[in-house]
Image (cartoon, helix red, strand yellow):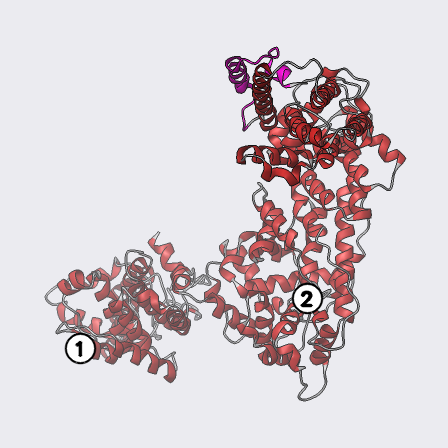
């Protein structure tokens, strides 16, 4: 194609016509969307202008009957470019260059630049042929001989023809010119879009319907198969090509990959799956892993984290140095490939749920608790849960649990088979590391040593060897008491991250003589891990772990009696059945049991104390207060009252009293009543602060504060006889449950209730005294029995005295009847929570108020035990069932 064909005009020397043609064609070849077309159009424009200028010169020069040699050469070159059989044939170009050799030197110099400009404006050509001519004429070394703009244009052209042709252009010598140009333009456009634009633009252009001849060369077909596959374009023709090429070269990995891509793009997923599985199994092809993960995410998303774990393959290293500090010690130890971490984050963006989501979150953030809850519980798909159990074992299991992974039967499902292959590979690698690597062997020797003072190699206590040793410690295994003590001394387990808290907790229990039993065999291996996981999770974070699902899982466990969890299982089961939850667990834990005590320390907290369904002992309330001192920053007066109550409680020891005294001493206030209040609080006789000062200055409810002060005074003065009456206790319970009060005031009320409960429980275990036991003056008497005894004394005593027959006997009967009546009155007062002082006051007021004794017939007795015993009509019923708090809440409704 000459410059005139490109411009779409006949040869002319009119500059205006050339410019007009150039401007009209310019919108069709925008520099950004069609840079090659634009460059060809510009070259055609420049060539046409040069031709016009040459024609002008020739018009002015004298006519020459014979054309010059340079002119003949240019004409011959135009003929070469116009001939479709020679335009793309390198042999024809070589023949033309042979003709150039016949030209004289001065003609060669004249024709060289003309050939260049003609070539630039020629449109689509063979880069190979153009390079042959450029090398022959040496244009690249003569750029300094031309103007700057022209030099830049020539340099760009020379760089462009350095690119290889999309195919062997000699294959289309028998085609028409239009077919040659269109095919070459199309293939070059595809290559340009693929190299310089997004795959979306490439796909959009390649998807346009077109009908073009294609050369029979293999290079173009292979390149298009690669480009189309990468852009996500499926083609039946390409599929047939890939199938045939794979048949001819089954060991060619690239054709197998392209065949897998084309099958997948055309919806032949089962056939594609076969190719991808082969690529992964035989060649560990990265693209195969990516495609299989994508398929798994679409078909079985719950297995996606498992497949990610299975594809995390490291080199199976077995040649460790005996030097524990050598760099090879890290080889073969558990770790994670960088692409695996990226896959975890990609999986996090998907809409996973349940155990799959828990596993991904564990691998990304290290929060293991939600996953453990899934692993130990009942699952709708037991086999899926078992697979996740194996995946967890690869990170946390010792040899016994890893051996279960190795013994897992193969699966007929393709994805499950891939999972198990990866798991077994990793399990075998880790068993090898645990049993053969120098660092694990050194640690095992240190742990199992019978020496009184075994020495750990100093290399394992610093740097990367120490990190590898801590990886070994992450795996669940039983240790004896001395082994845990050694490990704690060697590695300071409490200073390391959360992954080693389980070992640290076991070390704390071992100090009290509580250790994990040995691991059994078969199914007992997982049961041991299941129980140990439950125990460690409970001790690590009881507030999160004690969910109904986890408690239900504990119900189904057959806990080994030698396992520390057996010390907690009965209590958890009973609370779950009787109270429908474990909110009162903290109150039932016994400090005498090491497991209970450790759990209580992990469970302590002000809110836990307030939320407990059972009142905590004041020693445990003291621990809750000390565990969160910042909670009381806005309730200094309430904290002071709490410390005062605990300070006066004889249950606490001297050291605790000393701490409380210092705590009270550090609280100061400028108000005038504060010092006298503090002194009275320490003595157990606190005066009431001014109501206005409490309400306005300290934002404290004065009535509730006074209620607590009165209760404290009574308990300090009278002990068991100073326990507040039922109504006061009910009021204290209501205020204790009121979240509007500050934490200090609420805990102070809880401490007073706990103190009262302890005194009431001393009487709650006794049985009701028979109403007829009138001689037991320290007991209680109900209304009905009192009415009967009072009526009998008032009616029968005079009759018996009259019928006695003698005055002495009559007086004795009257005295006896009066004594029984007074004893009944006293016992009735005991039932009301009153004692002898009230009886004396009542006797003094009776002459003035003769109806006063009749009040005893109508007033209801105390519903709770008091210092005189249990309610007389309680029978065998426990009146404090569930504790004082639960009883008061029932009474309060």
Q: Residue at x 78, y 51 (%)?
A: 421
Image quarter (top left, top right, bottom left or bottom right) of the N terminus:
top right
Residue 233: x percent and y percent?
A: 69, 28
**Of label 1 and label 2, which has the lower sequence position?**
2
Q: Quadrant of residue 681?
A: bottom left
The extreme bottom residue here reads 452
Q: Which numbered dot is residue 675?
A: 1
Picture layout, residue 295 above or below residue 550: above
Residue 642: x percent and y percent?
A: 30, 71
Residue 877: x percent and y percent?
A: 45, 61
Picture layout, residue 23 above or below residue 496: above
Q: Secondary structure at mark 1?
A: helix
Q: Which numbered dot is residue 560?
A: 2
| Predominant SS along the magenta part | helix
Please tell me which residue lies in front, 600 or 7.
7
Q: Secondary structure at mark 2?
A: loop
Callouts 1 and 2 close, C-beta under 8 Å: no
Q: Which stretch is magenta? A: 3-32
Please tell me which residue lies in front, 264 or 133.
133
The extreme right residue here reads 248
The extreme front residue here reads 62
Residue 156: x percent and y percent?
A: 61, 35
Q: Quadrant of residue 262?
A: top right
Please tell me which residue lies in front, 807 or 561.
561
Query: Would residue 30 be counted in the magenta stretch?
Result: yes
Query: Would residue 36 be counted in the magenta stretch?
Result: no
Q: Is residue 675 left or right of residue 263?
A: left
């Amino acid at each position: 194609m000459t410059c005139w064909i490109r411009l779409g005009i006949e040869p002319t020397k009119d500059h205006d016509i050339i410019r007009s043609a150039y401007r009209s064609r310019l919108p069709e070849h925008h520099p950004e969307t069609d840079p090659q077309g634009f460059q060809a159009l510009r070259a055609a424009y420049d060539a046409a202008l040069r031709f016009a200028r040459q024609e002008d010169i020739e018009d002015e020069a004298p006519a020459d009957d014979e054309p010059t040699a340079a002119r003949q050469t240019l004409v011959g070159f135009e003929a070469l470019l116009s001939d479709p059989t020679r335009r793309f044939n390198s042999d024809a170009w070589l023949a033309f260059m042979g003709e150039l050799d016949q030209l004289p030197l001065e003609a060669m110099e004249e024709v060289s630049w003309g050939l260049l400009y003609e070539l630039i404006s020629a449109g689509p050509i063979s880069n190979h042929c153009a390079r042959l001519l450029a090398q022959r004429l040496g244009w690249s070394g003569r750029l300094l001989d031309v103007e700057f703009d022209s030099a830049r244009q020539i340099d760009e052209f020379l760089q462009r023809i350095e690119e290889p042709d999309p195919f062997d252009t000699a294959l289309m010598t028998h085609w028409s010119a239009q077919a040659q140009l269109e095919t070459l333009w199309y293939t070059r456009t595809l290559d340009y879009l693929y190299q310089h634009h997004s795959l979306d633009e490439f796909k959009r252009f390649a998807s346009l319907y077109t009908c073009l001849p294609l050369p029979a060369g293999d290079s173009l077909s292979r390149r298009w198969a690669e480009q189309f596959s990468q852009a996500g374009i499926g083609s039946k023709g390409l599929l047939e090509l890939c199938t045939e090429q794979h048949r001819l070269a089954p060991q060619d990995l690239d054709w197998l990959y392209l065949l897998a891509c084309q099958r997948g793009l055309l919806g032949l997923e089962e056939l594609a799956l076969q190719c991808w599985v082969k690529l992964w199994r035989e060649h560990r092809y990265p693209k195969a892993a990516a495609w299989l993960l994508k398929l798994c995410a679409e078909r079985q998303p719950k297995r996606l984290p498992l497949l990610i774990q299975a594809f995390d393959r490291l080199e199976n290293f077995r040649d460790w140095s005996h030097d524990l500090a050598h760099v090879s010690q890290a080889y073969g130890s558990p770790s994670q490939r960088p692409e695996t971490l990226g896959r975890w984050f990609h999986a996090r963006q998907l809409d996973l749920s349940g155990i799959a989501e828990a596993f991904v979150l564990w691998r990304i953030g290290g929060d293991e608790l939600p996953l453990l809850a899934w692993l130990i519980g009942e699952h709708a798909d037991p086999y899926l849960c078992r697979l996740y159990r194996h995946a967890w074992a690869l990170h946390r299991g010792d040899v016994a649990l890893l051996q279960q992974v190795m013994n897992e039967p193969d699966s007929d499902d393709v994805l499950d088979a891939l999972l198990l292959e990866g798991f077994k590979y990793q399990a075998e690698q880790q068993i090898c590391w645990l049993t053969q690597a120098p660092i694990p062997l050194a640690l095992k020797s240190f742990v199992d040593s019978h020496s009184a003072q075994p020495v750990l190699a100093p290399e394992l206590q610093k740097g990367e060897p120490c990190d590898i040793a801590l990886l070994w410690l992450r795996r669940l295994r039983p240790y004896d008491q001395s082994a845990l003590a050694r490990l704690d001394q060697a590695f300071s387990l409490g200073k390391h991250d959360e992954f080693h808290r389980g070992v640290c907790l076991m070390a704390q229990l071992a100090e009290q003589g509580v250790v994990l039993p040995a691991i059994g065999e078969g199914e007992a291996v997982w049961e041991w891990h299941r129980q140990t996981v439950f125990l460690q999770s409970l001790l690590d974070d009881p507030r999160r772990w004690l969910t109904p699902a986890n408690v239900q899982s504990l119900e189904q466990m057959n806990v080994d009696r030698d396992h520390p969890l057996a010390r907690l299982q009965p209590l958890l089961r009973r609370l779950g059945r009787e109270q429908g939850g474990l909110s009162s667990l903290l109150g039932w834990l016994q400090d005498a049991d090491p497991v209970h005590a450790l759990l209580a320390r992990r469970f302590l907290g002000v809110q836990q104390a307030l939320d407990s369904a059972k009142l905590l002992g004041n020693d445990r309330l003291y621990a809750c207060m000390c565990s969160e001192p910042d909670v009381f920053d806005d309730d200094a007066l309430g904290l002071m009252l709490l410390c005062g109550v605990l300070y006066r409680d004889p249950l606490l020891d001297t050291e605790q009293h000393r701490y409380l005294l210092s705590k009270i001493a550090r609280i100061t206030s400028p108000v005038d009543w504060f010092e006298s209040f503090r002194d009275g609080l320490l003595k157990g006789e606190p005066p009431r602060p001014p109501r206005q000062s409490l309400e306005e200055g300290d934002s404290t409810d004065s009535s509730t504060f006074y209620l607590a002060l009165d209760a404290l005074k009574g308990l300090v003065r009278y002990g068991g006889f100073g326990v507040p009456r039922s109504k006061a206790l009910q009021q204290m319970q209501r205020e204790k449950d009121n979240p509007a009060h500050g934490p200090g005031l609420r805990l102070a009320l809880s401490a007073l209730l706990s103190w009262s409960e302890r005194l009431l429980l001393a009487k709650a275990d006794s049985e009701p005294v028979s109403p007829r036991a009138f001689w037991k003056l320290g007991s209680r008497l109900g209304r009905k029995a009192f009415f009967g005894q009072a009526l009998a004394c008032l009616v029968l005593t005079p009759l018996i005295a009259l019928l006695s027959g003698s005055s002495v006997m009559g007086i004795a009967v009257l005295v006896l009847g009066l004594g029984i009546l007074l004893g009944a009155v006293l016992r009735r007062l005991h039932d009301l929570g009153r004692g002898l002082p009230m009886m004396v006051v009542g006797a003094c007021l009776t002459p003035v108020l003769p109806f006063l004794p009749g009040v005893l017939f109508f007033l209801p007795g105390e519903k709770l035990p008091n210092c005189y015993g249990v309610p007389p009509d309680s029978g065998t019923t426990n009146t404090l069932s569930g504790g004082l708090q639960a009883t008061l809440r029932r009474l309060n409704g």
